[in-house]
Amino acid sequence: MTEPMSPTGFWSYTRDDDTASDGRLSRLRVILTKELQVQLGRAAQVRIFQDVETIPTGADWDHEIGKALSQSAFFIPIVTPGFVQSRMCCLELMRFREHEAARGRNDLIFPLHYIDTTHLDPDRAGDCHDPEALRLLRARQMFAFDNLRFRDPGREDVLVRISALATAIRDALRRDPPDPRVMGLSLTGGPEAAEQARREAAEARQRQEAEQAEVAARREAEQREAARIAEEKRIADDAIRARVMRDAAKRSKLAEAQELLAGEQRKSLIWAEERRKRQESQLKEDADTRAHRLVSSSARLADQQPAQENFALRVRRRRKLLLVLLFDLPMATILIALFAVLVLKMPFFATIKSSPNLIDPRGGQIAR
């Protein structure tokens, strides 16, 4: 067993792709760095080179890129049509392939398939800058990411895929390098020994490739299963969110209806209260009017009562006078007549009547 390789990587991409994705590629690099650091623990610090983050202003760009490639233990190309058509990106890939071969490894390149490139033909001019670079990328096991590139890097399904990539890098860094004979170092025994070493190296390489293919297949199956689970969970979460939103909408409509009904009830109560107040005010006004009329009538009656009493008194007096005139005067006349008759029949008057000579009170004799 040998010591694990230093966890230093190279993030190869085009700035146009990062700009078009609103910086998602840069954020994915940060997330991958943190995830790989968590999986490796505190043994070593994880560093993933990115040109805009690492190369200082004014530095020799080509020199810094070459230095970073020579120090990197793994290489992550962000595969897009723009990547395979970029001269610098293809150059970075092929230069790291040389470093990988010098280490006797062929499992340190981890293509991240970000945008579909299956329509590109290596033999067709204009489809790619370096046909060998495109063939190399297609020969390596790619991590499918094209179905997640529009999602936020913080989503769970994106984090699951990044975690799978970090696991593959971790395993490659801890994997033992191939036997030195793979590089043709044991050729001191003559042509037969060299041929034997080449055959053994070829067999070892075939076994390693078979193991890598098996691991890659298993990893791909795990990734697909994780993606399927994440997709099912996303669908379930979306369904739950949709149901929650529908319930919230129903509750909102119900609350609005209840608020509207309450408002109508409040309006009805206010209208009824105003109507009651108007009725009470009208009744009070009517009562005040009747009381005022009654007081006015009483005052008029009080003012008119003496005159009415005087008028009644005069009427009674006149009635009495009329009764006197109608009844008492004839009676008095009758009584006077009777009295006169009685008086005339008295002896005194009879004597006077029977005397032959009557003396005039004035001193003379009344002639008969």
Image: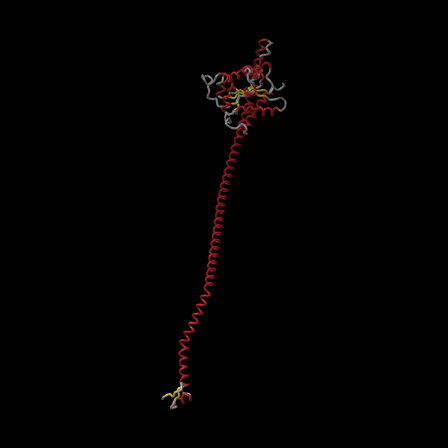
In the displayed structure image, the side of residue 88 where residue 333 appears, left or right: left
Q: Residue furthest left?
A: 368
Q: Is residue 292 visible?
A: yes
> As displayed, is residue 243 above or below residue 133?
below
Quadrant assignment, res 218: top right
Locate the C terminus and report the quarter of the image it occupies.
bottom left
Quadrant assignment, res 317: bottom left
Observer-nearest residue: 358 or 365?
365
Residue 222 rendering spot, x and y as whole percentages: 55, 27
Q: Residue furthest top?
A: 190
Seen at 48% across and 20% down, the residue is 82
Residue 331 rendering spot, x and y as whole percentages: 41, 79
Observer-nearest residue: 274 or 116?
274
Residue 360 rendering spot, x and y as whole percentages: 39, 86
> As displayed, is residue 342 above or below residue 57?
below
Q: Is residue 225 visible?
A: no
Seen at 49% across and 45% down, the residue is 263
Q: Residue furthest front?
A: 363
Locate the N terminus and report the quarter of the image it occupies.
top right
Q: How is the image coloured?
A: secondary structure
In the displayed structure image, the side of residue 361 where residue 59 appears, left or right: right
Residue 252 rendering spot, x and y as whole percentages: 50, 40
